[in-house]
Amino acid sequence: MCGKRLNRVESSESPICEMLDVIKPRLVFGLILFLTGVFWVSATTTVESSTYTIGVGVISIVSGLLLVGSKTLGYVWSIFLAASLYNLAMFAYLVYTSSMLISSGSIYQGWVSATSYLLVTVLYLVILLSSVIKPSYLAGDIVPKDTAN
């Protein structure tokens, strides 16, 4: 099914498509977005963080709740993609700033931070790629009009 969505003919499904057949992506992606939102909100309120991270936190929490609780896709698709892209950009920026810690002499803290932020960045990259490769995983039976064949 994954190859048909991309207008390609494949003899076997890709590993990411097989993985997505096993899990419930809406639930998992919604939970990841919700937990990321809690991370951003708690980082804003407890640490000397900029107030702009509260926005990505609230957007992530709302997106996660809508993704899990909504029966139709409609506007949830747009909010999900926006929140995921925003999180991808934020975590990629944190990888960059963590690398600055390494170059300034805080090697251990820099490597731990860079590694953890890199893992989350790759996670959001996988989330975005999987939702673009096979959007029906998020939609169930409803697929956005521009991706339907």
Image (cartoon, rainbow, N blue to C red):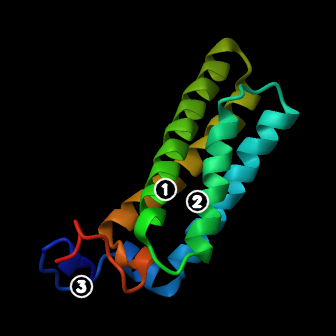
**Image side of residue 67 versus residue 110, left or right:** left
Amino acid on which the number 3 mark rests in the picture: Ser
> Residue 67 at x, y = what percent?
56, 69
Q: Which residue is mark 2?
A: 63
100 lies above or below 116:
above
**Image side of residue 90 versus residue 105, left or right:** left
Q: Circle 2: is it few (<14), some (14-19), or many (20+) Cα within 10 Å?
A: many
Q: Circle 3: is it few (<14), some (14-19), or many (20+) Cα within 10 Å?
A: few
> Residue 85 at x, y = what percent?
46, 47
Quarter location, residue 27: bottom right
Depth order, front residue of 19/79: 79
The alpha-carbon separation of the residues under discs 2 and 3 comes to 33 Å
Amino acid on which the number 1 mark rests in the picture: Ile
> Residue 18 at x, y = what percent?
39, 82
Q: Are discs 2 and 3 less than 8 Å apart at CB?
A: no
Q: Which residue is mark 3?
A: 12
Amino acid on which the number 2 mark rests in the picture: Ser
**Image side of residue 90 versus residue 127, left or right:** right
Quarter location, residue 52: top right
The alpha-carbon separation of the residues under discs 1 and 2 comes to 6 Å
Tag of residue 79: 1
